Image (cartoon, coloured by chain):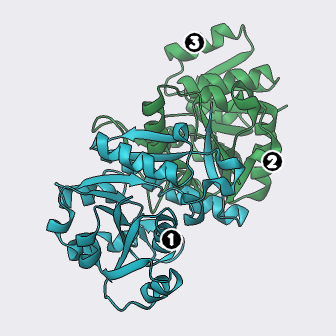
Chain colours: A cyan, B green
Amino acid sequence: MNKIAVLGTGNVGDAIGSKLIELGHSVMIGSRTSNHEKMQAFVAKHHGKANAGTFEDAASFGEIIFNCTAGVASLDALKMAGESNLDGKIIIDLANPLDFSKGMPPSLSIANTNSLGEEIQKAFPKAKVVKALNTMWCGLMINPSLIHGGDHHTFVCGNDTEAKLTVNEILQSFGWIAENIIDLGDITKARGTEMYLPLWLSIYGATNNGAFNMKIVK
Amino acid sequence: MNKIAVLGTGNVGDAIGSKLIELGHSVMIGSRTSNHEKMQAFVAKHHGKANAGTFEDAASFGEIIFNCTAGVASLDALKMAGESNLDGKIIIDLANPLDFSKGMPPSLSIANTNSLGEEIQKAFPKAKVVKALNTMWCGLMINPSLIHGGDHHTFVCGNDTEAKLTVNEILQSFGWIAENIIDLGDITKARGTEMYLPLWLSIYGATNNGAFNMKIVK
C-alpha cells in the first residue's frame, strides 16, 4: 500500500481517490485551497480515511501523485504543489488540455506537435510522468468491468519503464486486464491519447452515453 | 451501380477502386497526370474494367467522388479536378492531413479548430463532403470482415444527411455492419476522426500490426 496524492477535486479526483482508499492506500486529496468545499465533502464521505490539504500538502505527503486537475490548469497546480515535492516521484497524468473558453465543443490548448503530458515532463524533469486513463469517463477508469466484462483497452506512456510498470500494477488493481494495458512508448505518445478526445466527445455526442470505451480488435 | 471517380493512385485509391470495380461500379481512377505509372498498373490489372485519367477527367466522369489523395495534397488535387466537376456531387473524403515534412511521427497540417474535411467543404461549398473510413488501414476499409468477424466501428460525418445515407449504403456494400457505422454529425466532426490518427499510429507502432480497428464497447 502506498501514500498517494490525488490533485484535483472534480469527478476524476473523487473517483480515483475513492478507489485508492477502497484499495487500502493512504490518500491525501489536494486542492488550490485547503478548505475547498468538494474536498471537505470527499473527506466527510470517507469517514476519516481520507486526508486533505493544499496541492503542496498533498504532493509532499504522496509517494505517487495522480494529476486529476483540469488540463488547462494542471501546470499551475503542479507548480503550486512544488517541484521539490514532485522530484523523483511518479506523476500519473490523467488530465486532458480541453479548452472550453471558445465554446463547445472544446478544442485542445496543446496539441499536434506537443501535449500536456510532455509539458508536465518538461516542467518537472526529475519527476516520472506517466500518461494514463485519459481516454474515458472516470467511472470506467476505476471500474472497467462496468462494461463489456472489462474487456477493452487503455494506454500508458512515459519515459521511465519502471514507473510505467508501477502504473500498470495500479491499473490492474483497478480491474484492468494486464494484456489490455497498451504501453505506447515514451511521453510524446501522450499526443495521441490527448488528441483522441475530440473523437471521444463526438462519439459521446452521437450516442448520448459516456460509459463506452474502445476495444482494439485485430 | 454508379459512375465513381477515385482520386489518388496510392494504396487507398487502389483498394477502394478495386473494390468498387468488384462490386460492379464504373470506375475512373484519377491522378495528377494521365500517364501515372501506378494508374497504368491499376488499369492493367483490371483488364479493361477500369478507366483512368487526370483528376479532371475522373471528377467529370464520376457521379460520386472518392478522395484518396494524400491529405496534404487533397485541396490541390480537388482544385485540379475542377469546381464545376464537383458541384452537387458527393465527395467521400478518406484522407488524413498527415505532414511528414518534419520527420516521424507525422503531425497534422490542419487540426484542433479545423480539419481537412471542413477545408474541402469550405473550398467546394456546393459539393456534399462526407468524411469516412479515415480511421484505419485501407485493407480494412473495403474488407472489415478481415478482423473480428467484421464487428468493429467506423464513422461518417458531413452536413448533408442524404449524402451520408448514400455513403452508409456504400460502406455496407463494402461489408460494414449497418449499426457499426456511427454518424457523428456535421463535417466539423472530421476534427475528431482526423485527430485520432496520432493514436492510431502509436498503437500501430506499439503492436507492429496495422490490421486493427476500434470497436466501441458499452
Instruction: Give the residue at x 49% y 74%.
Output: A14
Does residue A22 appear left or right of residue B112 in this picture? right
Image coordinates of residue A32 in percent, x first then y, are 31, 84
Image coordinates of residue A57 in percent, x first then y, are 25, 78
Q: Which residue is mark 1?
A: A18
Instruction: Give the residue at x 67% y 35%.
Output: B60
User: Crowding at label 3, few (<14), some or many (≥20) Cα neighbours within 10 Å?
Assistant: some
Q: Which residue is mark 3?
A: B40
Q: Which mark is residue B179?
A: 2
Q: Amino acid at mark 1?
A: Ser
Position of the C terminus of chain A, as image quadrant, is top right
User: Crowding at label 1, few (<14), some or many (≥20) Cα neighbours within 10 Å?
Assistant: many
Which label lies toward us, 2 or 3?
2
Q: CA distance from mark 2 to mark 1?
A: 36 Å
- The chain holding disc 3 is B
Image coordinates of residue A62 in percent, x first then y, are 29, 67
- The chain holding disc 2 is B
Residue A181 appears in view: yes
Q: Earlier in the sequence, mark 2 or mark 3?
A: 3
Does residue B118 appear left or right of residue B178 in this picture? left
Q: Which mark is residue A88?
A: none
Tell which of B107 and A137 is nearer to you.
A137
Q: Quadrant of residue B192?
A: bottom right
Q: Is residue A88 above or below residue B101?
A: below
- The chain holding disc 1 is A
User: Crowding at label 2, few (<14), some or many (≥20) Cα neighbours within 10 Å?
Assistant: few
Q: CA distance from mark 3 to mark 1?
A: 63 Å
